[in-house]
Image (spheres, rainbow, N blue to C red):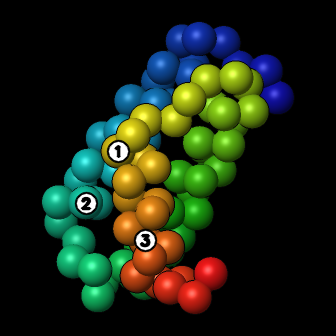
Amino acid sequence: MKIDPTTATALNELLRELASELDLHYDDDAFHAIEPTINAMKRAAKLVTDAGYTAPDSYQHIVRRFERNVHPNR
């Protein structure tokens, strides 16, 4: 899917802000509760990366943290 730079920027801003809030407000043992949110963020980030843009570092950090705590054996 092709997205324009304005849309990519807006999605990245949302991903950055949401990732920062999740990182701040959720302890590792509560990450199971945010799985639907992480999955929605992954879909948005895929739109961004498939269009040739880079997802924000804060998004990548929260996904790594989520995977480490929810799916440690993957």
Whichever of callouts 3 and 1 sits on the residue coming sooner in the sequence is 1
Mark 1 vs 2: CB contact within 8 A: yes
Going by the numbered disc 3, the residue's amino acid type is Phe
Mark 3 vs 1: CB contact within 8 A: no
The residue located at (53%, 52%) in the rendering is 41
- Judged from this view, the residue extending furthest toward the right is 1
As drawn, the label of residue 66 is 3
Residue 53 picture location, percent across and down: 61, 24
Can you identify the residue that label 2 sits on? Answer: 23
- Judged from this view, the residue extending furthest toward the left is 24
Can you identify the residue that label 1 sits on? Answer: 58
Please determine whether, in this image, residue 69 is positioned above or below residue 55. below
Q: Locate residue 47 relative to residue 65 in the image: left or right.
A: right
Residue 39 in view, yes or no:
yes
Going by the numbered disc 1, the residue's amino acid type is Ser
Q: Nearer the viewer, residue 74 or 38?
A: 74
Whichever of callouts 1 and 2 sits on the residue coming sooner in the sequence is 2
Please determine whether, in this image, residue 73 is positioned above or below residue 13. below
Residue 21 picture location, percent across and down: 23, 53
Please determine whether, in this image, residue 20 is positioned above or below residue 25. above
Q: Nearer the viewer, residue 72 or 1?
A: 72
> In the rendered view of the protein, which quadrant contains the N terminus?
top right
The residue located at (62%, 81%) in the rendering is 74
Q: CA distance from mark 2 to mark 3?
A: 10 Å
Disc 3 packing (10 Å; few <14; some 14–19; many ≥20):
many
**Mark 2, secondary structure of its residue:** helix
Disc 2 packing (10 Å; few <14; some 14–19; many ≥20):
some
Q: CA distance from mark 1 to mark 2?
A: 9 Å
